[in-house]
Amino acid sequence: MPSPSTTVTNATTAAATVYDPTQTQAQLPQQTLGQADFLKLLVAQLSAQDPMNPVSNTDFAAQMAQFSTLQTTQTMQTNMAAVQTGMTGLEANSLLGKNVNLRTTNGQTVTGVVSSVQYQSGTPSIVVNGQAYDLNLVTSVSQTQTSSN
């Protein structure tokens, strides 16, 4: 007779490879487990457990704590990405009207005043001399010279 851990391992492996006919697009394999994967594994473990030797309450509570931690971590990761995007946007906006020097990917130096900020797919870029550039190309920033009348 197989041990309870072998039964759980086999059941969780089978649950992780279940075909989902509702998905019509081919997906790349994920490198990490998400909430849905964790719940599938937990349900598979509970349904395949040995009735004579069930999972202890302590083990179940530990798994629920892991699930809660996973959920909190994913929420925090999403929030941090939003904060980072906001900070990058603020950085781009702070350059409006300032002189910048840029080093392009081909090594060319561009100098000019930042005239606007453009967003493409949520990522800001600055417009200098009518051309959009990534923020990471900026090598220096200075105030614009104002002429007195």
Image (spheres, helix red, strand yellow):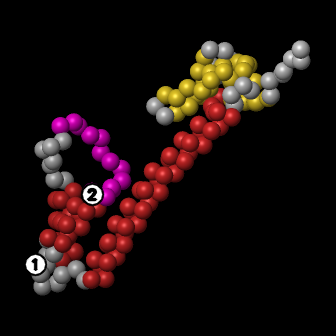
Query: What residue range appears in magenta?
Result: 24-37
Residue 109 visible in the displayed image: no
Quadrant containing the N terminus is: bottom left
Callout 2, which amino acid? Answer: Asp
Residue wearing tag 1? 1
Q: Quadrant of residue 137?
A: top right
Mark 1: few, some, or many residues within 10 Å (few <14, many ≥20)? Answer: few
* N-term-proximal mark, 1 vs 2: 1
Work out whether residue 145 or residue 72 is closer to the camera in this orientation and state it. 145
**Magenta stretch: includes residue 27:** yes
Q: Position of residue 36 (x, y in %)?
A: 27, 57
Say which quarter of the image contains residue 124: top right
Q: Position of residue 122 (x, y in %)?
A: 49, 34
Callout in the foreground (1, 2) = 2
Q: Which residue is mark 2?
A: 37
Tag 1: amino acid: Met
